[in-house]
Image (cartoon, rainbow, N blue to C red):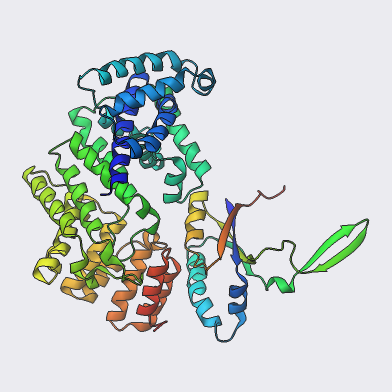
Amino acid sequence: MDAHRTIERAARDSYGRLLAFLAARSRDVAAAEDALADAFRAALETWPRTGVPEKPEAWLLTAARRRAIDAGRHARVHAEAVPTLLAVADEAQDLASADMMFPDERLKLMFVCAHPAIDAAARTPLMLQTVLGLDAARIASAFLVQPAAMGQRLTRAKAKIRDAGMAFELPQPKDLPPRLHAVLEAIYAAYGSGWDDVAGADPRRKGLALEAIDLGRLLLQLMPGEPEVQGLLALMLHCEARRDGRRTPAGDYVPLSEQDAARWSRAMIVEAEQLLMAAEKGGRIGRFQLEAAIQSAHAQRAVTGHTDWEAIALLYEGLVRLAPTIGALVGRAAAVAEARGAATGWELLNAIPADATRSYQPYWALAAHLLKRMQRLPEAEEAYNRAIGLCEDPGMREFLMRRAGQVP
Amino acid sequence: MNYSLLFYLSPEEFEARKDPKKREAFWKGFLPYMQALKDAGIVVAGAGLEAPGAARTVRLRDGQRLVQDGPFADTKEQLGGFFIIDVPDLDTALDWAARYPAGPGGLVEVRPNLPPVS
């Protein structure tokens, strides 16, 4: 990791900690953000020159307070929030300046962001913005919406947190699994990959991949030993390990089965494997551990030279039982086709309801591939065209055109 | 809700659409996209437009009809075609715009259509 990214991460870490602290006490995320906005900007400008200060939180609070006192700023912050916020900021500054444990409320903030009352489409962006301090424009471009629309979505979510007086607390043990799942889903949505065994990583989201891994690491730090958190981080690291292998040096798309395993990141694979082993010790299997286990089975090719498709098919079987998403159903059909023949895979693929697959690109890419293998060429061509028409990524489009025999 | 997807093409793309040697390369990306839109059952209307050289711009000045050769706006990329699609929301419309196989310089504008005047 380069020095700039280290500093950026330290700044974001501090930002997230402070925002969580201020918001947990004032329950007003927007007001807390407003108070910290300039301080964070100043940190990103100053720290690369001066290095990360010894007490980053104290540095940021001093910078934030200086701005918060400006009368002009108060008009932008909700008036009733100002006294609370200043009092909380003072409390935080006392804690940060003294050598006391500065309480880390980021986990509570993550659970609030993924609260059932928050619009599902807003959860991931909200987490990226509040915990990592990413700006709305960057998040909007990764999610392919207009920055203004993203800004509104985030504003509405924060208003909801404030007006509903949502509690910043950890869920009760009985409520934990579904709430944790929403947090994991939100992080995975930011990573947005996992497609590489079928076709097409979602090109829109790749800009946030490293941030998603950061969020995963942070979550693990806050909930050490939680198997699904370890599973999610292992899954993301396995996918990320293949980033370079997914394209030729000329930029052409390479499917997983044809990737040169020597171009995969050994360090990330090792880390992912360790996480997955630790997760297994937890004795509670879950969706993300299964998805990570599938990717782990693919990664074995780097060592053994071949892919155990039967094992992958079985893992998908388990995944489909736990979480029968369209992605898992298509993935299972792909693995079964490799393990037990194209016709068997095709039967599974064909059984997926047409409503779910009409505009789902990986389904058509796999259908084309299997139909071609079964020598059903006119149908294969139709499916290739469908997959090509639904493509967003030019590299993938070219790849499918080559497969379809439309270009040399 | 109806949205218009407006496809802007570079002069090279306008040329490629008609050039016997380059036609195929141009259409092989676009035809599957068109088909995918139709298969999704969301197309209300659509048309490809002739190159801007074929455009006439009509103005009325003091009751006089003024006809000028060429398109209204003198920009490099010009409107080359459009689809009106009926989708639930802007995000879905943007998803479809992202699937358009734009050539270099090409782009898609997405605009909500006004509701019908009753």
Count of marks overlaid on the render: 0
The percent position of residue A345, horizontal first and vertical second, equals 23, 70
Using the rendered view, name the quadrant where residue A309 is placed: bottom left
Tell me which residue sits at (13%, 55%) in the image: A270
Specify whether B38 is left or right of A133.
right
The percent position of residue B15, horizontal first and vertical second, equals 62, 78
Residue at the extreme front of the image, as rendered: A50
The percent position of residue B98, horizontal first and vertical second, equals 48, 59
Tell me which residue sits at (33%, 47%) in the image: A190
The percent position of residue A271, horizontal first and vertical second, equals 14, 51
Residue A374 visible in this rendered orientation of the protein: yes
Using the rendered view, name the quadrant where residue A204 is placed: bottom left
- The residue lying toward the viewer, choosing from B65 and B90, is B65
Using the rendered view, name the quadrant where residue A401 is placed: bottom left
- The residue lying toward the viewer, choosing from A209 and A99, is A99
Tell me which residue sits at (20%, 19%) in the image: A100
Specify whether A194 is left or right of A31.
left
- The residue lying toward the viewer, choosing from A352 and A49, is A49
Above or below for A111 versus B38:
above
- The residue lying toward the viewer, choosing from A71 and B40, is A71
Residue at the extreme bottom of the image, as rendered: B20
Quarter in which the C terminus of chain A is drawn: bottom left
Residue A28 visible in this rendered orientation of the protein: no
Tell me which residue sits at (31%, 23%) in the image: A58
